[in-house]
């Protein structure tokens, strides 16, 4: 997630300190969750929970960011790091609470934000995607299963002048990660659900069950359908079946070789059916990821799925005029009547990139691949706290966007005009927060 913040020299430093502001907002963010924890565990463990949250904000290291031995030194100080590690172990190994408490916290906040978006006449978007946590050097850790290595796939990508890399899939030990973010066009997302699951052993899970349970909860709690935005990994009949069963709208990137039914042209593969779909509108769009300005066209067709002929669907075809990328086929249950509706679907799918940034931030910035915990349930608790930290950072961007430039100017100043007007990623915000909290930590260490 990134935001554009001005960093001009005329910005004055606020009177209140950044550390006080951060500690106040973090305390307010965790207050509902701490109240539930107090009813289940000892208040000393609740205090350790809050300190763990702050320690993850403070300690930045993708390789060791979630090691209990490292985080323990930020809880009790360097001189008493073993005692801090013991406190963390007692918190995470406690049988009186589990990771479902954090899931309920996210879901309650999601329902509140959905109500706010609907009152503001904004369409809520639920962004789905899957990733994986790779543990290539692990072997006996509980809950490990075989996952395709995205890192190996990236490192073996063909490069000119080098030997041809392996062509087969590279699989390593790890576990799967399913995430769901709530957002709207032009809005900063928030975490709705983050689940880690495995396909082997005692805690074996079927990934599609996660979507089934979430759709069931949404239907029970909300009267109006929401728009679910999904990538090609979900392009299957079961996704459409469940969306229709739970009365939800969907925007699904469809695969070109899957079949669709047209009233006049019959049953054809998607890319053959889309050939007769003429462009009905053109627009210049900026691709921020590739730093390109593209001439994009959009058109649509009324279609049906072969397995659900009673349901009217619409195929939105998005093309790049210069052919830099292949056409994008978007299948949706939302009625497309005007050009404005078609562009709304195209922009809604492009907004799905926010969840890709969430996966990247979780691995590269928050160190979600670094924990060395033996037990599955203990690991889920720690990763749940990391998800809380990420949602807190998004909350700062969404709620206190006017305060962000002051924090960046004070704690991570950068020179050059580009850094004053560029899009500032969430990584740099966390650097500023870490630097601000480190001052308080250093004062505490010196006074002790």
Image: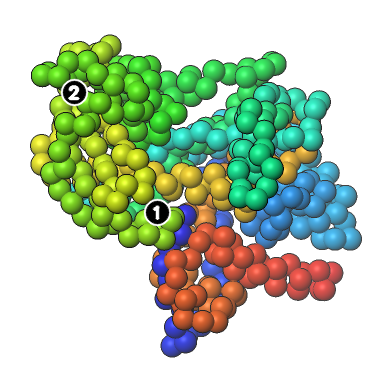
Give the image location of residue 337, x and y in percent: 10, 37
Q: Earlier in the sequence, mark 1 or mark 2?
A: 1
What label does residue 64 carry, if any?
none
Q: Is residue 179 left or right of residue 237?
A: right
In the rendered image of this protein, does residue 221 appear above or below residue 279? above
Secondary structure beneath label 1: loop
Residue 57: image quadrant is bottom right
Viewer-closest of 292 and 2: 292
Q: Is residue 12 above or below residue 176?
A: below
Task: Classify mark 2: helix, strand or loop.
Answer: strand
- Residue at image position (72%, 47%) is 66
Q: Which mark is residue 188?
A: 1
- Where on the picture, by quarter, is residue 334? top left
Residue at 42 percent across and 47 percent down: it is 353
Q: Is residue 59 visible?
A: yes
Q: What is the quadrant of residue 43 in the picture?
A: top right
Dots 1 and 2: beta carbons under 8 Å?
A: no
Residue 132 vs 432, above or below: the answer is above
In the drawing, does residue 326 fall left or right of residue 318? Answer: right
Observer-nearest of 81 and 429: 429
Relative to residue 143, is residue 62 depicted above or below?
A: below
Residue 258 point in image, percent of width and height = 33, 21
Q: Residues within 10 Å of mark 2 (few under 14, many from 20)?
A: many
Residue 384 position within the rendered picture, expressed as x and y whole percent measured from the top left? 60, 39
Mark 1 to mark 2 CA distance (whole Å): 33 Å
Q: Residue at x 67, y 28 (%)?
A: 171
- Give the quadrant of the C terminus: bottom right
Left or right: 39 in relation to 355:
right
Horizontal side of 119 relative to 166 (left or right) equals: left
In the rendered image, which residue does mark 2 sit on?
303
Q: x and y percent of residue 378 in the render?
A: 71, 33
């Amino acid at each position: 997630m990134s935001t554009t913040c001005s960093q001009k020299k005329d910005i004055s430093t606020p009177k209140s300190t950044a550390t006080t502001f951060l500690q106040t907002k973090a305390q307010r963010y965790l207050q509902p969750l701490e109240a539930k924890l107090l009813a289940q565990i000892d208040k000393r463990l609740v205090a350790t929970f809050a300190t763990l949250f702050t320690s993850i904000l403070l300690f930045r290291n993708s390789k060791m960011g979630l090691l209990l031995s490292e985080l323990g030194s930020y809880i009790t100080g360097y001189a008493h790091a073993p005692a801090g590690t013991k406190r963390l172990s007692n918190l995470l190994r406690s049988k009186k609470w589990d990771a479902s408490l954090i899931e309920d916290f996210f879901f309650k906040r999601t329902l509140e934000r959905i109500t706010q978006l609907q009152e503001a006449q904004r369409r809520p978007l639920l962004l789905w995607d899957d990733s994986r946590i790779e543990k290539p050097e692990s072997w006996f850790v509980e809950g490990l299963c075989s996952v395709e290595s995205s890192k190996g796939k990236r490192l073996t990508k063909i490069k000119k002048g080098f030997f041809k890399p392996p062509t087969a899939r590279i699989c390593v030990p790890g576990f799967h990660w399913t995430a769901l973010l709530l957002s709207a066009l032009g809005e900063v997302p928030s975490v709705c659900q983050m689940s880690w699951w495995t396909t082997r052993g005692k805690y074996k899970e079927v990934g599609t069950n996660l979507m089934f349970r979430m759709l069931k909860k949404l239907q029970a709690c909300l009267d109006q359908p929401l728009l679910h935005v999904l990538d090609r990994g979900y392009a299957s009949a079961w996704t459409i079946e469940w969306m229709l069963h739970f009365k939800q709208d969907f925007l699904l990137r469809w695969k070109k070789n899957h079949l669709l039914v047209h009233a006049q042209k019959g049953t054809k593969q998607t890319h053959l059916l889309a050939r007769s779909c003429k462009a009905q509108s053109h627009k210049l769009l900026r691709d921020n990821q590739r730093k390109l300005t593209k001439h994009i066209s959009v058109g649509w067709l009324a279609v049906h799925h072969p397995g659900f002929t009673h349901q009217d669907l619409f195929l939105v075809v998005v093309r790049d005029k210069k052919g830099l990328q292949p056409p994008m086929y978007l299948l949706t249950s939302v009625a497309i009547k005007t050009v404005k509706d078609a562009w709304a679907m195209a922009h809604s799918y492009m907004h799905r990139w926010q969840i890709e940034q969430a996966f990247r931030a979780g691995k590269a910035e928050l160190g979600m691949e670094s924990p060395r915990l033996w037990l599955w349930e203990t690991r889920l608790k720690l990763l749940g706290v990391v998800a809380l930290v990420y949602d807190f950072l998004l909350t700062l961007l969404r709620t206190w966007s006017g305060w962000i430039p002051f924090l960046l100017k004070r704690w991570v100043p950068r020179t050059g005009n580009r850094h004053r007007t560029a899009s500032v990623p969430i990584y740099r915000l966390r650097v500023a927060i870490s630097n601000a909290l480190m001052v308080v930590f250093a004062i505490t260490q010196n006074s002790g």
